[in-house]
Amino acid sequence: MNLNFFFEVLIGGLLSGVMYALVALGFVLIYKASGVFNFAQGAMVFFAALTCVSLTEFGWPLWVAIAATIVIMSLLGLAVERIVLRPLVNQPEISLFMATIGLSFFIEGMAQLMWGSDVKRLDLGIEDVPMESLMQSLNIIVSKFDVIAAGICALLVTGLALFFSRTKVGRALRAVADDHQAALAVGIPLQQIWGIVWSVAGFVALVAGLLWGSRNGVQFALTFVALKALPVLILGGFTSVPGAIIGGLIIGTSEKLAEVYVGPFVGGGIEGWFPYVLALLFLLVRPEGLFGEKIIRRI
Amino acid sequence: MLYREAGQFKSSYETDSQIFPIRQDRIGIALLVVIAFVGVPLFASPYFFSAILIPFLIFSLAALGLNILTGYAGQLSLGSAAFMAVGAFGAYNFMLRIPGIPLIAAFILGGLCAAAVGLLFGLPSLRVRGFYLAASTLATQFFVVWALTKVRWFTNYSSSGVITAQKMQILGFDFDTPVAKYLLVLVIVSTLGLLAKNMVRSNVGRCWMAVRDMDVAAEVIGIPLMKTKLLAFAVSSFYCGVAGALYAYAYLGTVEPEAYSLDLSFRILFMVIIGGLGSVMGSFLGAAFIVLLPVILNTLAHTTNISTAVASNLELMVFGALIIFFLIVEPHGLARLWQIAKEKLRLWPFPH
């Protein structure tokens, strides 16, 4: 077995794992704060990327387009909170989940209605070329784009972790996550908190959409990114930010390694289901994921 | 005033435990059966059969299967299309490899294959629940479709992966006209529907509901969790499997893995939610709603004369918005609305 090749696959897997983690992060944020399993996260990724690209096509500079998209995503988040979530307070989780599936249909339709359904190219100004220093010293090909993307993700995650643990809003978020009613009773404005969470999730969706989109083009297939993030969530636990990161790394590497080393024996294309089966097997050992809160059931 | 149960006394256990205890319900159902079996075949057009009635019945069956699992036993599943695929490919292979096998036997065997797969993928439900389980049922969806595409034996080494379904024939009679197909599907769906209705109001169904409401408590009062959950998975997958076989044979006319995508799984889940979780009737109402909605939207789009791309996106938006609307207005689904209507009808014309 070629060791260099193995490391190349491993690093490639780790870096794509970071991208998965980024999408999973959007899920975790909303699930933590409102107990909603937001299936529309994939659609939000798509919508954010498409909006940003279309704005640049009007001739706006990239950073203006990004800023404008952040505003639009925040408005979307607030609208979702107002129109969809508020009337559904205290409904069973499955109803909320179904509502987000409906929401994802709505956002997908809206995005394509507004901006057309063509595949669009997005150029962030980061080249997708092998890093020369690594190539010369270790003879390993690693894309510069992937490394920068991983760096952005790391920044974002650190920022969010600090936001959650150090700021007042972050503490309020965690209180809401623990118990809606208790949080309301001590005077935390639930609606405002949810609005913030959805806006932040929209921002995370934008970052994910830009990174994924500049890789593969901004197209409808971006919505399937959400499906990639689900095994990450199961593995890492729905409620844990570090879980999303580590789960993403595990899924990314094992998926790439499996595709390269196991795939040829079974006809390839196993990337689609391998992460799920892996996560499933893992669940049999730890039903709440790696870092999920321990589920205690009482009668 | 017509719908009143006053004066209908139950004087034996048999009359007390019949499916429809109210006489008006029995008359209504009898009328419905007569209309479905005699009236509709006499008057409906072929388009109506193949575009609306047949898919409606097939989706009702699939929704019923999912409703047993999700609505009655409380195990959320996003993989119903996978079980449908197993049923369809099972039926195809039985008919291909055992010459002269009766059609119904092939469908039942296909359903049993789906039940076996359901048992296998139901095993995680013993350890995980809620969204973790929902996400892990996606494993079924992706794995089954992948396996059916990659393992060429299932598709009988056909080059395109799309196979024409064999003719449906029972005792020398060809089911090839829309009316004949409709009647065949109707017989199968109503038989299985009756079976499901009886199952959910018997011991089995009560065990499922106990597990749904709180599985730890159910275990404490002596309900075997493993047996109950796995039975729910098996029965639900059997229903989905038969529905999948019918979908391939009576509706599409082809057997192909791509027909059983994640999208179909979601659509069936929508039917169950919109129709009403934990209601046999809700499965039928939900299926009717989801089958009719695109037809109506399409007709509307044609009359207003907008381009197809815009129309399809608008359809997505309206679809999504309607689902949200329904969840907000009536989270318990159409079945609950029907029940409210009945309550009102009992008192009519008095307010209380």
Image: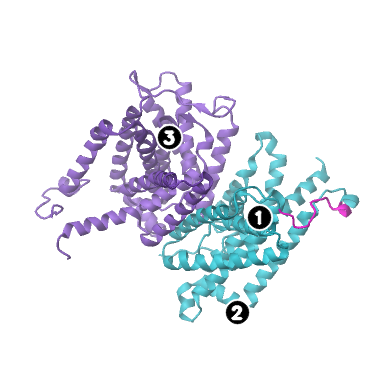
Chain colours: A cyan, B purple
Q: Answer left or right for B211 relative to A172.
A: left
Locate the N terminus of chain A and report the quarter of the image it occupies: top right
Under circle 1, the secondary element is: helix
The front one of B81 and A238 is B81
Which residue in the structure is indicated by mark 1?
A: A20
Q: Residue furthest left?
A: B7
CA–CA distance between discs 2 and 3? Answer: 55 Å
Give yes or no for residue A264 being in the magenta stretch. Answer: no
On screen, residue B130 above or below B287: below
Graded by Cα atoms within 10 Å as few (under 14), some (14 to 19) or many (20 or more), the crowding at tag 3 reads: many
Measured as percent of width and height from the top left, residue A245 is found at 67, 60
Q: Amino acid at mark 2?
A: Lys
The front one of A128 and B231 is A128
Q: Which residues are magenta?
A: A122-134
Q: Amino acid at mark 1?
A: Tyr
Q: Residue furthest bottom?
A: A186
CA–CA distance between discs 3 and 1? Answer: 35 Å
Measured as percent of width and height from the top left, residue B141 is found at 53, 43
Which residue in the structure is indicated by mark 3?
A: B247
Q: Chain of mark 2?
A: A
Question: Picture quarter containing residue A270?
Answer: top right
Residue depicted at 41% across the width and 64% down the height: A91
Q: Which mark is residue A168?
A: 2
